[in-house]
Amino acid sequence: MDEAFQPYFRHLTDSLRLALADTPVVSLLGPRQCGKTTLARTLEPQYAYFSFDDEATLAFARADPSGFVAALPERAVLDEIQRVPGLLRALKLAVDARRSPGRFVLTGSANLLLLPDLGDSLAGRMEALYLQPLSAAELARQPGRFLADLLAGRIEAELRQTTELSDTLPRYLLAGGFPEAVARPPARARVWHRAYLRTLVERDARDVARLRDMSALARLLELLALRSGGLLNVSSLGNELDLRRETVDRYLDVGERLFLLRRLLPWHRNEAKRLIKTPKLHFVDSGLAASLTGLRAEDWHIRRERFGRLLESWVVQQIITQAGWTDPDLRFWHYRDKDQVEVDLVITQGRQTWGVEVKAAMTALPGDGQGLRRLAEQCGKDYRGGVVLYSGDSVFALPGQNTFAVPLARLWDR
């Protein structure tokens, strides 16, 4: 992170170029300030740029969607498209009249497909790509091949030297992945995180839902930051905040639409049962969660349980981010059975299944793979392997089918 002021290469760039080569409309979605506009404006040939954060542009598009689209040049970036979802119907008509690849790039700080007032889904005409906050591999300016190695079975025992994680890992967790935050020292990053969340609560949340009590949403986010990495109990949240269950559910939906929160559904051999079991709740950006909970680097050794939960959310985010340039069709779950045996992250590709366990300790023991062995029993021949990510410096086999202890540094050092 010492080179924070130099531009970072975004590994999703190649996927964006491929999509534009054969698809009329590509939406680049992700949290506000994660780098969508910067990435879109690097496209060649140059695209004209229009932002709906500009009030005059927004007013024109809302008042006359067809006229606005008709006035656009051949190639255009339309930034913050969630502010005018009704424009999508006019874009559909324009694309149907002249269907050529790479006409429009839509960037959005809210998930278009989850918006209640979506004008049109542009089905068959649009491909959606999701840009996440900077991953640890991007921050380290490395290719980010951990997930690809796991899927290909390229995890092998090795002795290795790695960076001192008692310093590196807390810094990654506390900084998160927003470019503006990682460029600042920790105290200034916390100020940025708090201002960022205020903007989302006070302004952006109004673009994606009709909410009456924004202060309740802010309180909910603070409580969820403390519980990131835990099972989601909507009734308990409602009781603590004196909110109805339906209200909590609505606020959770807003958090997901704005890419603040992620609900990780439970994996079960019986697919129907996945729908009725309890999901896990993760903050998408660890830096935001850390700032809300007041965690600091010096707390690494004295608040290990809270750091452990945050670490789990951070690892989930790293792997899902790598999926964007490795295989966007992967699906992600958590596993927890009646005996409370757990796997932090389950990855599926069709019926093929992998498991990932996370621990902050410097050592990994045979018992740490218990959840992975239970998952393997459930999957049978569909199980492809698993890893226990830990803070040590060697890769070695653990009991179980194709199961290894792997240093957390593998997420960013190659």
Image (cartoon, grey):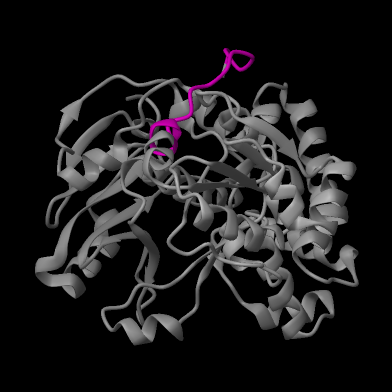
Above or below, comparing residue 351 to residue 14 in the picture: below
* Front position in the image: 289 or 166: 289
User: Is residue 7 rendered magenta in the image?
Assistant: yes
Residue drawn at x 69%, y 72% as measured from the top left: 116
Q: Quadrant of the N terminus?
A: top right
Horizontal side of 110 relative to 173 (left or right) equals right
* Front position in the image: 394 or 37: 37
| Magenta stretch secondary structure, dominant | loop
Residue drawn at x 75%, y 48% as measured from the top left: 68
Residue 85 spot, x, y in % from top left? 70, 60
Residue extent of the magenta highlight = 2-16
* Front position in the image: 234 or 368: 234
Above or below, comparing residue 407 to residue 311 in the picture: above
Give the quarter of the image for residue 272: bottom left
Horizontal side of 191 relative to 40 (left or right) equals right
Residue 180 spot, x, y in % from top left? 70, 28
Horizontal side of 261 relative to 371 (left or right) equals right
User: Is residue 45 rendered magenta in the image?
Assistant: no
Residue drawn at x 61%, y 17% as measured from the top left: 4
Q: Quadrant of the C terminus?
A: top left
Residue 165 spot, x, y in % from top left? 46, 28
